[in-house]
Image: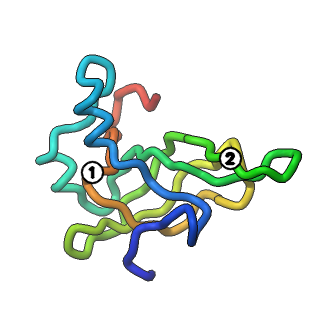
Amino acid sequence: MDMQLATLDDDGWELDDAEPIAAAHPDTFWMPPREERDALVPGQQVKLIFRILVADEAGREEVHVERMWVNVTGREGSLYTGELDNQPYCTDEINPGMPLCFEARHVINIFREGEDES
């Protein structure tokens, strides 16, 4: 796998850096502590915010935002590798199993058995 983050221009999608969002909205936007996001291991599931470029019916491009689960598969330096575990609502161009890279700053939730998956 090519170890680099996706971009809207090159890949048609990218991940939101959740840290500034959490800092701007501390009462309404929770994310796991940095220590937990820095210590992910293969087999864990994390939720990331995807920005996906899609064409509307008139052919105009617009960005859709979806929060989706990713299975962590590895790590190299500050980059984690993973595989998408959801099907986006806005496109069939991205599918479960798609490999991707992300960083701790992208993680907005870590799945814990017995907790609500929302």
Farthest right residue in view? 58
| Element type where label 2 sits in the image | strand
Q: Which mark, by number, is residue 87?
A: none
Q: Quadrant of residue 72?
A: bottom left
Q: Which mark, by number, is residue 62?
A: 2
Residue 43 picture location, percent across and down? 34, 58
Seen in the picture, residue 47 relative to 8 is either above or below; the reply is above
Task: Please state, as top left, top right, bottom left or bottom right, where the N terminus lies in the image.
Answer: bottom left
Seen in the picture, residue 36 relative to 93 is either above or below; the reply is above
Tell me the amino acid under the disc marked 1: Arg
Residue 101 picture location, percent across and down? 40, 67
Q: Which mark, by number, is residue 105?
A: 1
- Direction from residue 115 to residue 69 in the image, left or right: right
Give the residue at x 11% y 47%. 35
Give the residue at x 32% y 19%. 28
Give the residue at x 25% y 54%. 104
Tell me the amino acid under the disc marked 2: Glu
- Direction from residue 36 to residue 71 in the image, left or right: right
Please state which of the two labelled residues, at mark 2 or mark 1, is closer to the viewer: 2
| Element type where label 1 sits in the image | helix
- Looking at the image, which is closer to me, 70 or 102? 102
